[in-house]
Amino acid sequence: MAGGRSVVTGGLGYIGQAIAAELQRRGEDPIIVDRRPIPPQLEDVRVIHGDIRDAHVWDQVDTPRAIFHCAGLIQVGESVEKPARYFDDNVSAGLSMLSHVLERFGPIPVIFSSSAAVYGVPEQTPIDEGAALRPLSPYGVTKRQFEEILAAFEGAYGIPSVALRYFNAAGTDGRIRENHDPETHLLPRVARALVAGEAPVIYGSDYPTPDGTAIRDYIHIQDLVEAHVAARQYLEDGGESTALNLGSGRGMSVLEMVEAFRAWLPDMPAPRKVARRPGDPPVLVAAIDRAKNVLHWSPTRSDPGRLVGEAFRLAVSQ
């Protein structure tokens, strides 16, 4: 396999930059590919501004060691309203990328940012990788479809891959922070509301859960990116293509996570409960034994109190 610099697509996003930062910490010199005209949070990183579906982007890259594929749209609710955009960006663009990569470099390992959204409403919790894939949203469908494309490309062309099914990423590694526009992730959204003196919003209070709010599995970004590097090593060592859950293995309700901010702001206003967002299942909690065994990895930073504290301190500092 190739021994060059790894490429991170969508590398100006939260997870992409965190992966690039982890590679830098390990003495590597990653290449970011991203079409957005925004500055990186990292210093001394090469950025190719362009769309992954365009051939000239890949003409600027020497044969890479691996591709961390994080490019794509991520808003579940928006995907329900604008499915065409999601199928174009998350499936068609990725398919073009694989064709360019195969033509230029051959079977380069691909580590794909997939999602727990591929599961939809699971029949049992925690969810293991053998659960049925029945996504509720077009976003989840695009993730499932790209996993299927990777499997087909592996069978036909020998491209090895690991699809990492993220649950709820949160936290900071000290340099990289969440900065979505609009911000849809729970912890930074709540923290920013509280710092502004506003009541945090909870979407959905009528789920079939103990307190009526959705239950999610929150994983620290640093735990997440270390799993990506471990997945690359797994493929380089000859591991078979696979899909793996990345979470903490523990579920917390949205209300529990919001109320945890009282440790930082005891007189915080009561949360405001509004209607559910389309495409959100009641419970998503990861079974992570397979990731632990395959990658020799374990989440060590994903304590909810730590995640809430980091989100609040970042919001105060902004």
Image (cartoon, helix red, strand yellow):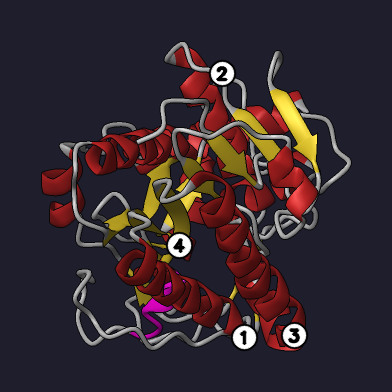
- Which residue has dot 3 on it? 84
The spot of residue 223 in percent (x, y) is: 36, 36
User: Dot 4 surroundings within 10 Å: few (below 14), some, or many (20 or more)?
Assistant: many
Q: Is residue 45 magenta?
A: no
**In this view of the protein, can residue 213 be seen by the observer?**
no
| Type of amino acid under label 3 | Ala
Find out whether the residues at labels 1 and 2 contact each other: C-beta distance under 8 Å: no
The spot of residue 23 in percent (x, y) is: 48, 23
Disc 1 element: loop
Q: Residue 159 carries which label?
A: none
Q: Residue 278 carries which label?
A: 1
Find out whether the residues at labels 4 and 1 contact each other: C-beta distance under 8 Å: no
Between marks 1 and 2, how big is the CA–CA gap?
A: 40 Å
User: Dot 3 surroundings within 10 Å: few (below 14), some, or many (20 or more)?
Assistant: few
Q: Earlier in the sequence, mark 4 or mark 1?
A: 4
| Type of amino acid under label 1 | Pro
Q: In screen coordinates, is 269 left or right of 15?
A: right
Q: Earlier in the sequence, mark 4 or mark 3?
A: 3
- Which residue has dot 2 on it? 29
